[in-house]
Amino acid sequence: MTPDPSTPGSAGRLFVTTVAAAGPDDGDPVAALFTTSLGFRRGPDLDLGRADTLCEQLRDLAGECAGGDTLVVAITARGSVVEDDLVLLPEPPGDAPGVRVGKIVASLLAGATPMGRLALLLDVGGDPEAATWAVPITAAGGAVLEVVLAATPATARAPSPFAVLFARAAMLPASGGPAQPLLTLAGIVRTLRADLSSGNVAEALTVTHHSFGSARAAAVTFPNPRHTATAVAAARFIGRRAALAAVTGWLAGGRDAPVLQVVTGVAGSGKSALLRAAAGTGPHLRLDAEGRTEDEVVARITAALEAGRPLTVVVDGVDEAVDPPELIRAVSALLAAYGGELRVLLAAGSELLPLFVAEAQIVDLDAAEYLDRDAVRELAGEELRRAMPDGSFATADAARAAEAIAAVPGQSFLTARIVAASVAAGARLTAVDDPQWQAALPDDLSAAVHADLSGRLGDDAARARALLLPLAYAQGAGLPWEDTWPALAEALHPGDRYGHDDVRRLCDSVPGYLVEDLSDGQSVYRLSHAALADCLRAGRDETADHRAIAGALRAAVPRTAGRGPSWADAQAYTRTHLITHAAAGQDVDDLFTDVGFLIVAAHPQMVAALPAARSEAAQAAVDAYRRAEEQATEGTHAAYLELAARCGGATTLADAFAEFPRPWSARWASWHVDLPHRPLAGHTGAVLCAAVGQRAGADVAVTGSDDHTLRRWDLTSSEPIAEPLCGHTAGVTAVATGWIGDRPVAVSGSDDRTIRRWDLVTGSPIGEPLTGHTGGVTALALGAAGGRTWLVSAGRDGTVRRWDPDTGRPINPPLTGHTGAVTAVALGELDGSPIVVSGGHDSTMRVWDLADGALLGKPISGHDAPLTAVVLAVHDEVPIAVTADQNGIVRRWNVSSHSPIGSSLIGHTEAVTGLAVAELDGAPLVLSSSDDRTVRAWDLVTGRTVGEPLAGHTRGVAAVAFGHVDGWPVVVSGGHDHTVRLWDLALKWHSGRPFAGHSDSVMSLAALSLDGTPIVVSGSADHTLRVWDLLSGHPIGRPIAGHTGAVWSIAAGDRDGRPVVVSGGADYRVRLWDLLEHQRFGGPLTGHSAWVWAVALTEIDGRPVAVSGGDDQTVRVWDLDAMAELHNGIGHSSGVTALAAGRLDDRPIAVSGGRDKQLRLWNLDSGRPVEQTMTGHSGTVWTVALGAVNERPVAISGSADHTVRLWDLTTCEQFGRPLTGHHGTVTALAVARLDDREVLVSGSDDRTVRVWDLATRKPVGKPLTGHSGGVRAVAVVDREGTPVVVSGGHDNTIRVWDLATGTPLEYAEFEHDAVGAVAVGDLNGVAVVVAGGADHRVRIWDLNTGQPVGVALTGHTAPVTSLALAEVDRRSVAVSTGPDRTVRVWDLAAGRAFGDPRTGHPGGAACLAAGRVDREPVLVTGGHDRTVRLWDLATGRARGGPLTGHTGGITCVAVGRIDETDIVVSGGTDRTVRLWSLATGHPLGEPLIGHAAAVTAVAVYQVDEHPVAVTADAGGTVRAWNLTAGRHRRWSLRRERQVSHPGEVRAGAAVDGLAHLGDGRLALAAGPALLLGAGAGTEPERRIVLDTPILAVAGRGGHVVAGTERGVIAFQVTPQPSQP
């Protein structure tokens, strides 16, 4: 395409229209726009009456579009939707059938060249259905095609409303201001649609925009006729001479100057201007922190440090960072870590000063030495002269006015500028000598803005403020105009209407308030100064405003029919900053659970908003995002998010990714999720410190936060205690607990430089704040030493201070010596004398005598980075100090000798932030928290890690503490994600792991015996029932599906000797299920007209009956033999919510409870209630059970009033006092016997299960805790002679407890164990995964669904390390082996062993493979004894003697074929690969030599009818061998630099697994990476990185299964598209 000669250097631009459009260009606004204002060349007109010719013409024109060329086709016509396609009809009507738009789109794309840009503007009238017609989705290749569809019911006319509005939108600055070089077609459409929503168009008009092509392809753009290339001139810096000299002097000072200088002052004092002026004096790294997270800023600085040192960094906009305190702490940590090699100059508000270390040099622009009234006067005068260039007033008057403005107390540069501009606009200089005029001059920014807008705009000032307000909340570079700015103004001022003309008038009226900038090539607008935002937001509910803004941004997102918001087409501002507004508006949970948004949302803003998640579903999504963010790259976000959701157990979230394209998909996972913990939400800022103290005899946690508050937490209920403790005026950075006299207290330290004491019981402050530190308080210690109680503090001022905790008086002098901030202190004793140990930024630890303040010995060095934490412990009477630093290193020291103990404790990957001493089973531990988001436990004596890292925080962990809950050891952690988390250190929650499988709340439970096995049946809000084996803890069979709504209630019994379950649900149905077959008995029982909340089973005259109750107020009785209704009756005045059935005086009865707060007794023979009602509850009755107290029959009820009540069934009177103790609705009850007494088990929304003695009405033991959501169901069942409690709840899990002891039952859990062997095969025509793991078991799953098949196969006494699948006598079998030195064969269909265990290798078999010789199944084993052995798989007999030749242990074997010979390929630790005849055992040829490390994996397959073996080794090298020639091709998986070879790939670990997927495709497991390749010797097509090592891999076709340290996971892989 020829470029437009009128635009030198431009790409070609061609505009084409049809004859149906208005004739000449001057009559067609769109044609005139493109051919005049936008510089397009007019092409030939097209004729809709000749479809084939038109499409051929379009194909040719598209083919002329070279890279960067743009073709615009505009068609105005009548249209009609025919057979799901839009047909454009010619004018005048004739015999021609018209042209299908689908054909037009296909023609354009068929002719398009790569990088060509095509636009199709369709202006269609005549058919209302055209407005909702979906443009066909078509592959665009390398080109981009954008379609605009404008539809109106009216017949097209000239000029059409669309043409007029489109031309207007393109010429409005809303589509692109002067700074924007190019207009986008999408932006013009957004501007047009905003015009439509403002009511400017009377006719019905719908306009949609659709884009086809690569996400990375350039959008369709046009030259912006308003663009001016003039560079923005830098503002002239006025005055501040002393301050400028101080800053430039610091910049020039180099290593001799302090490492940190802070420019501070009130808003508008000129901080940013000063930095801009000073930073031009040298080669410094300049950063603007506005809208950025601390991670972004630190990453920029770190990258610059790696490029060269020393480095000076200038950081502006700290006040406008995402989290200013966190940014300052992060920069301070960098300064401490890099010593004099890093220097930082930054600007920050005065309220942030306490966060800086004492050695920071402060330049306070409000201080007398830097206050520059002359500069204010000069600025005011210049503004007056600029505003009156014609010299309207005398220079002397202007000078006196400037003097008067500067004389106003507290006048800032910004205020002075606005006042001067206002004065000039009002032409009021004639009164400059009038004292009243001078007195009326505004003395603060808010008054100045109000006076200025009122003076300039009069009655329109309020509308101007309304339009400026959205900019006060704008994030990043600013707000786009288009469809965003006016819409946000309307959202913030409901009932008002604002359009493009209003915004244009604002820009013309008060240009000094606005700045236009560019963001990704788009014009965006913000206020000219951040202080204006504070002024405009003053007095408003900012939370509500952010919520309104978030709502308006969501409403503007285009929606796809049937699929919800099309986030990929949303404004860039929405994709980037919507999450920030929603988080600030406390309305973010639904965004976290919208997977389309998760995929496109900007990463830094998402990370900053993660702490705002509140609901369980949102927390699950946040956890998935946190896991995925570390590995996701462009194009893989959806895949890694799905993977993270699968591994986190968030099945519903994972399933939601199905509609989004992904290069691979995690289909299912049987996975060990992170250790269970309870997040405690309440703080609105980073949790910076934590301690555990005593309150009323129980441990409570105390946490301090950046939100300036302390909170107390009940560790049993996980709930906050009363209101937050308020008083500090900055972040709470340190907390300690202890006793002052006999009063339990908490002591807090803050960045406000004060220390406060609090009564831990009442929460009241004790005395006045303790002052003395000249920098923020960083650490506290409170305790007894040397016979008295001490309070010790540390601060950023480099001092350690001692205090009398009773009086609050300081014990002077302060302890000085550290050469930087002191960040940690700990109290203890040394030889009976009180000591304090301190650590700080100077990387030293110091030991002080508390009594006299003397330093004991020399400072202790050993760390290479600033110290962050210290604790003291005593072991075997030796005082031990444990220290940690910013490099993540933990060290132990003998305090007496000042010598190190053992080696460093290494495991954290980022700075350690806190330490605590703990004890587990009598062993002393050290707990460490870290910025790497984990807490680790270490054995104090050996230094070894204990258990797994505690992972769950979504940002760095800032603090850790240790305590107990009901005697169990717990860890309390606080993080930058605003949460406190409670962990079970003894892993009792872990060992008592829940049964997981339901994807929604477990609402009901029923227990019974099935063939002698105790089982429990669960009903869930996910619409299914599940059956669980209480012996193994695993599900039996598939979920039982049939209900179309939540299953609210179930009951178990038998029918004709077969175990059955009856269920009722939200689909108004009652259903009966055969538990043996997992099938329904007949159809549903219908009759209820609302939700069925309760069901029960009993007998009437020997016939099994079900009783049901629902929200239709009825109780119904059903004959289960006839599957018909017997009775129905009404006894409640509102819904029936609970039922129990039994016998009373040998009569069948039922007791019901309802929303009317009453219970009714029913005679089931008649189906009628008795006359008496049971009243007493003050809330809905949610559960009923039947029992006996001293042989008296009773009904027991639980209610929303938090109580349990007993009722005498013979009198219907309440029996004794209510049982109280639950703190939420009592939702479930079960009666059982324990030690010859009747007990009651109750479950509640307070997340606990409680056990009660029915005779004494007293609780039995402690509450059973572990559920992270409300408990909705309980049952009691006998498990091998032990009565157990089964509970289910809103956390979607089922938990099992020993009724007598209250301890969770321990179940061997495969998901929590490493899976070292996997195989894929078939079982009864179904593809299955067979896996063996560290739990000694072999398990089977359905490959496609992930559902368990059968039961676990047990027999091994050690982990299963190798598997093979085969067929014996038409039976599918698995063969397994492990360190127990046995080989076992399993009949997969029968679920039992096939024959006896086989032995033969003296050291046990290490690997297995299966093949056939003469159609007979043969097993191949390789052993540690350096031999390969062959076995008859059917009989278990050896086939010949051992195959010898390897000089090391055999690590892998495989079976293949060369020509007509079946072969075995083996690899071993001797680094060789050997071939053997499968039939005879004879070696074939010479060993294959080339590996430099032990061979770890082998696969054999055919490539172009040639046999190929692929082998891998522990060094990361993979080789492909042509087995007929012995040649090989090598490629390496090692990361180190080496000579590149064709086909070379790199990973980070040895290859531990290798599988052939078919068609020559391979899967390799290398460390945590799964590499998927097209074949031997080729680069991997896909790399999937997990968060755990992969131990084994298997696959078939598009399915790949990985066995890992955390369980097994199945992927489906989309083939890589071929490159053109």
Image: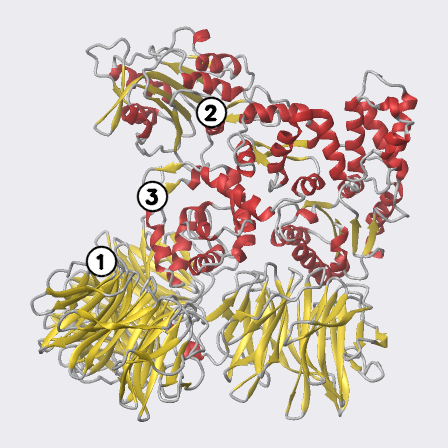
Vertical placement of residue 334 versus 1264, above or below:
above
In this view, the mark in front (3 or 1): 1
Which image quarter is the N terminus in? top left
Image quarter for residue 674? bottom left
Residue 690 sits above or below residue 272 on the image = below
List x then y, in percent, for residue 507: 64, 26
Q: Position of residue 1371 (x, y in %)?
A: 13, 71
| Viewer-side residue, 583 vs 1371 | 583
Q: Nearer the viewer, residue 1028 or 1133?
A: 1133
Label of residue 1617 in the image: 3
- Please, what secondary structure does the residue beneath circle 2 have? loop
Residue extending furthest toward the left:
1122
Judging by the rendered image, the residue that carries numbered circle 2 is 199
Q: Closer to us: mark 2 or mark 1?
A: 1
Q: Nearer the viewer, residue 1195 or 245?
A: 1195
Mark positioned earlier in the residue sequence (2 or 1) = 2
Q: Secondary structure at mark 1?
A: loop
User: How far, Cα to Cα, is label 2 from label 3?
Assistant: 47 Å
Residue 281: x %, y % from top left: 81, 41
Q: Amino acid at mark 3?
A: Pro
Q: Are marks 2 and 3 in contact (CB under 8 Å)?
A: no
What's the mark number on residue 522? none
Residue under label 1:
1068
Q: Is residue 1524 visible?
A: no
The image shows residue 1179 at horizontal and vertical percentages of 39, 67
